Amino acid sequence: MNGSNPRQPDSRSTAAAPETGAAFNPGSSAQDRWNRGAWLFRDSTLEKIEILLDEAFRVPGTQIRFGIDGVIGLVPGLGDVLAGLLSLVIPIAAWIRGVPYITLVRMAVNLGIGVLVGTIPIFGDIFDIAFKPNRRNYLLLRRHLGEPRRHTGKDWVFLLVLAGAMALIFAIPVVLVIWFLIWVSSH
């Protein structure tokens, strides 16, 4: 802050609000809260977060890049949860900036895949380094901001495949239970 009343936004924080596309009533407490946290949702900050999480380091002599997401994931149990929480910044910023729900669902699935597969020791960490869910989510956010309200067929195919996979996952136990009941009743 600039030494003034903490409830009054300073000139640095009010300059950041237009980049996020937010529209609030001047002088409201919501405006003050938004201005104090607006730096977190700027393109430059989100790009730095994505790089830190997925691409900050390079394996010497290779083109393989990884970030703290892959390193934190080495801590059993807690590491993947903590990395997943850090990874929520980009989808939250996308939601605040008005990204359509279909894109938010893709971001959530990218994050879920990264966290779930990341829980598998060693293999999950290698997968996180290759899959780069934060990079994927950042690129989805950039694509939406560059071409608002445009969804590709790839978005819809992704959701249909996801819905089909979820239906299959839920159907397998039901089919197995029915098969087991039929088997038990015949013996």
Image (cartoon, rainbow, N blue to C red):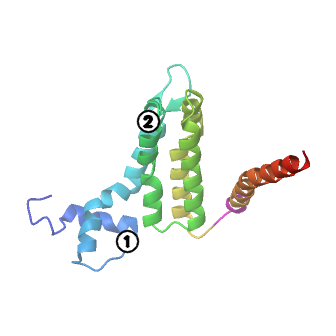
Where is residue 72? Give x, y as percent: 43, 33
Camera-side residue: 125 or 24? Answer: 125
Q: Which residues are magenta?
A: 151-158
Which residue: 55% across, 28% down? 121
Q: Which mark is residue 79?
A: 2
Toward the right, the furthest residue is 186
Label 2 Cα neighbours within 10 Å, binned few <14 / some 14-19 / many ≥20: some
- Magenta segment: does it hold 134? no
Chief SS of the magenta region:
helix
Give me the C-alpha separation between circle 1 and circle 2. Answer: 34 Å
Where is residue 138? Give x, y as percent: 50, 51
Where is residue 90? Give x, y as percent: 45, 54
- Which amino acid, by three-letter code, is at mark 1? Ala
Which residue: 50% across, 23% down? 59
Quarter placement of the C terminus: top right
- Mark 1 or 2 closer to N-term? 1
Quarter placement of the N terminus: bottom left
- Which amino acid, by three-letter code, is at mark 2? Gly
Which residue: 57% across, 42% down? 116
Where is residue 157? Give x, y as percent: 73, 59
Q: Give the side of residue 156 with respect to residue 116, left or right.
A: right
Which residue: 60% across, 29% down? 123
Toward the bottom, the furthest residue is 25
Q: Which mark is residue 22?
A: 1
- Magenta segment: does it hold 157? yes
Secondary structure at numbered mark 2 = helix
